[in-house]
Amino acid sequence: MDDLLLEFLTETSESLSVLDVELVKFEQEPNDTEVLGNIFRLMHTIKGTCGFLGLPRLETVAHAGENVLGRFRDGTLEVTPDAVTLILRCIDTIRDLLGVLEATGAEPDGDDGVLISELNALAEGQSTTPDPTPDPAPVAEETKRPAPSAAASERSGARESAVAAQTIRVQVEVLENLGPPPLTRSR
């Protein structure tokens, strides 16, 4: 694998970790234009670099996510928990594709059409289905999913836990890379 691709993988993984943290902040304060601007720039950079490196699948997914973020930034699209969840799915897909790229040295084949369609529909102001997988059979009333507000709260809590765990992993990795502190003599 060439150095340029390795550098891209490293920087993009770091950017995705930042995106996770920033999206949690953004979901809590959707009017924070500074956080939104940072999220948009990170996604834009990922998209542009994918295009430069000839990674069309990654570029297409990132582009669709960037379109939604651009609409948030322009104020033409309301920030909702479902919209943020869709952006998080986009980021998870990018992360998964990067994992395969890192392991094999090539962008994987596949189809992200459902996710891209949902992102494009959201960017165009159309409603999207938060969970594209249909239930296999009718669900009894007592086993149905919680109300959207409870589900959104549950997703947010799970995201915060995942972000906290990722932040700790990154911090441990940084400390491990630094090595032990230098020995000093005491007088």
Image (cartoon, rainbow, N blue to C red):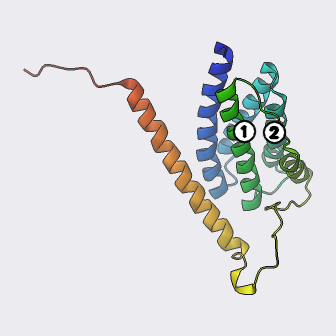
Q: Which mark is residue 61?
A: 2
* Image position of 146 with respect to 37: above or below: below
Circles 1, 2 touching at the beta carbon (< 8 Å) = yes
Amino acid on which the number 2 mark rests in the picture: Val
In this rendered view, identify the residue nearer to me: 159 or 138.
Answer: 138
- Which quarter of the figure has residue 43? top right
Image point (70%, 49%), residue name: 88
Residue beneath the point at 38% across and 24% down: 178
Residue 94 spot, x, y in % from top left: 72, 39
Residue 29: image tag: none
**In the image, 174: left or right of 122?**
left
Q: Is the residue marked by circle 2 packed among few (<14), some (14-19), or many (20+) residues within 10 Å?
A: many
- Residue 176, percent from left and from top: 39, 30
- The residue positioned farthest toward the left in the image shown: 187
In the image, 103 versus 89, the foreground residue is 103
Residue at which label 1 appears: 94
